[in-house]
Image (tube, grey):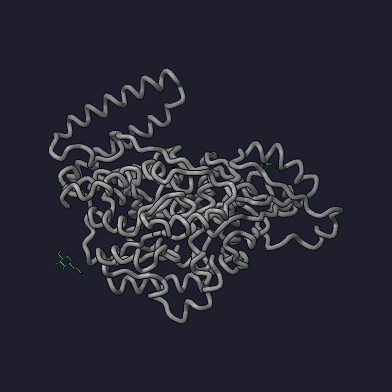
Amino acid sequence: MGVDKVWRFSLLSTNLALLHHPSTKNACWRSPAKFPRRKPIALSVVVCGLMLFVLGLISLLTGHMASDLEWYSRRFVQRTFYSRLNGFYSDPVDVWQSQYSGYYYGCSERGRHFAPIVREHLSNGYLLIATSGGLNQQRTGITDAVVVARILNATLVVPELDHQSYWKDDSDFNNIFDVNWFVAYLAKDVRIVKKVPNKVMRSMEKTPYTMRVPRKSEPEYYLDQVLPILLRRRVLQLTKFDYRLANNLDEELQKLRCRVNYHALRFTKPIRGLGQRLVMKMKKMADRFIAVHLRFEPDMLAFSGCYFGGGEKERRELGEIRKRWTTLPDLSPDEERTRGKCPLSPHEVGLMLRALGFANDTYIYVASGEIYGGDETMQPLKALFPNIFTKEMLADEELKPFLPFSSRLAAIDYIVCDESDVFVTNNNGNMAKILAGRRRYMGHKRTIRPNTKKLTALMMARDKMDWDTFARKVQECQRGFMGEPDEMRPGRGEFHEYPSSCVCEKPIVDE
Ligand SMILES: *[C@@H]1O[C@H](CO)[C@@H](O)[C@H](O)[C@H]1NC(C)=O
Ligand SMILES: *[C@@H]1O[C@H](CO)[C@@H](O)[C@H](O)[C@H]1NC(C)=O
C-alpha cells in the first residue's frame, strides 16, 4: 500500500531544487584514465602544466580564481604522485572501488575559533522549523535549520516533519530520527530543545510569527530580515523549510552541515536494526553487492515527460498521472531523451552495469517502489543479473510495522544503499544526491551515476555494434560519472551532493 509511494520523494524536489547539472568537460585533473594508456606521463604533465599556466594567467587577469587554481594544481601534483606510486596508467579501472578512495577522509570537526554555543536564556529566541517534502528533502531542511539557528544565535526547537506532503506520512521527528542523539551530538553547535518552554509560551502576547524565506537565502538575509522579527517576537516559525539556505557558506558552516547530515541525524533504533539486518543478509550471500536506486515508478516516469516504448497504453496511463501536477510544462519526449533527462529503463541499467564489467553473478539490491510495468519491466534486468533482491524479498514479518510509513521504508532503503559497495543512481533526486554526497564523505565509496545524455544515444545504437565495442563505449561515457574523488571540485553542484568542505586529503606518507 504505502510502499509504492516511498520512492516518489525526490520527484517534486528535483523540480523545486532547481538543480542544474554541470556538464562534465574533459579536463586533465578529472580522470587519469583519460590519458591513453601507454602515453608517457611526461606528455600529460606538459599538457596539464600548460593548461594550469593558462588558468593562472586568466586568474591573474580576473583575480578571483586564485584559490581554485591552487586547489587544482595541488590536486594535480598529488594525483601525478599517486599515479606513479600505483602505476595507475596501466591498471584497469576497478569497478568496485576507487583506487584513490584511500587518500581522502571525511573531515567535519569544528575549527579552533568556532564560537561556543549560545545559552538558551541568552539566545535571540526560539526557532521553529516546519520541513517539507519526503524523507531526504526533509533531511536537507533539518540540516539547514541547524545552520540557520547557528547564524541567528537562536535556540532551535526539534524540527517538525511534513505530514501533508504528497507522500502522506504521520511520522514525527522522533519516529524517524534518534532525537536524543541529535540534541547531544550538536550540543557544542546549537542549543536544541524539544519544545518551547511553557513559561515562554505563556509570556507571548501573540501566536508565533510564521514566515517563509526565499529559496537559497544568504546568511545576510537571515540576519537582516529574520533576526529582527525573532528578537521582537522571541518565537518564530519558518515554514516549507527546504533548500532555504544558500549553497555556498563559509567553511565552518559547511562543516556544521556535515556534522548534522552525516553524524547527528541518525535513524531510530528499530529502523537501524532492520536496515542492518537486510545489509547482513546481502553480505551473507555475497562478499560485496551493488545497490540500485531504480526509481522506475509510474509517478516518476509521468513527471519526466519521457516515453518508454509502451505504446498507447503507456501514453494514456502516464498522461493521466501527469495531470496531478498542474504546472508541468508540455515536454517533447524525444527532446527530453536527447537532453538526457529520461531515466534509464531497468534493462538499460543492467546493460550499463554489465558493460562496466560487473559479472552476471553480482548481487544487486534494488531500492524502489512499484516498478512501472511490473515483472515484465524487470525481467530483462533479471536476465542480466539473476541475483536481484528488494527489501520485501529479504525481510518477512519484520517489515510489517513499517509498511504504513513511507518515510520509514525510505529510511530502510537509505541504509542498505549507504552500506552497499557500489551505489547506482538512476535519477537526480534528493536521495541520489544525498547518498552520493554521504558516500564521498565516508571515504569515496563508489557511486555510479549514469551519464544519460550520452548513454541514451548509445543504447539506441546498441544493435549496430558488437558487445565489446558497446562495452568500451559505455566505459568511455561513464568516465567522470563513477564517483571518483576528483569529480568533486569546490563550487560544483549542490553541497549535499559535493560536500567539498568536508572531504580532506590524507597527508602523503612515503612508504
Ligand atoms: C552570536 O554570538 C556570537 C558570540 O558567540 C557573536 O559574535 C555574534 O555576533 C552573534 N550573532 C548574532 C546574530 O547575534
Ligand atoms: C554467467 O556468465 C557465464 C560466463 O561468463 C556463463 O557461463 C553463465 O551461463 C552465465 N550465467 C547466467 C545465469 O547467465
Point 67% across, 54% down: residue: 129
Position of residue 505 relative to residue 377, above or below, is above
Q: Position of residue 17 (x, y in %)?
A: 53, 46
Is 380 located above or below residue 261 in the figure?
Answer: below
Residue 130's quadrant in the figure? bottom right
Query: What residue is rendered at 41% in x and 22% in y?
Result: 59
Q: Nearer the viewer, residue 30 or 336?
A: 336
Question: In screen coordinates, is 196 left or right of 476?
Answer: right
Q: Is residue 327 visible?
A: yes
Name the quarter showing ligand 1.
top right
The reply, left or right, for residue 388 in relation to residue 414 is: left
Residue drawn at the location 39% of the way across and 59% of the way down: 294
Q: Is residue 112 something one can see in this rendering? A: no
Q: Where does residue 430 sit, x and y in percent of width and height?
A: 49, 53
Residue placed farthest to the front in the image?
A: 312
Q: Name the residue furthest bottom.
A: 397
Q: Position of residue 46 (x, y in %)?
A: 22, 27
Residue 303, percent from left and from top: 49, 52
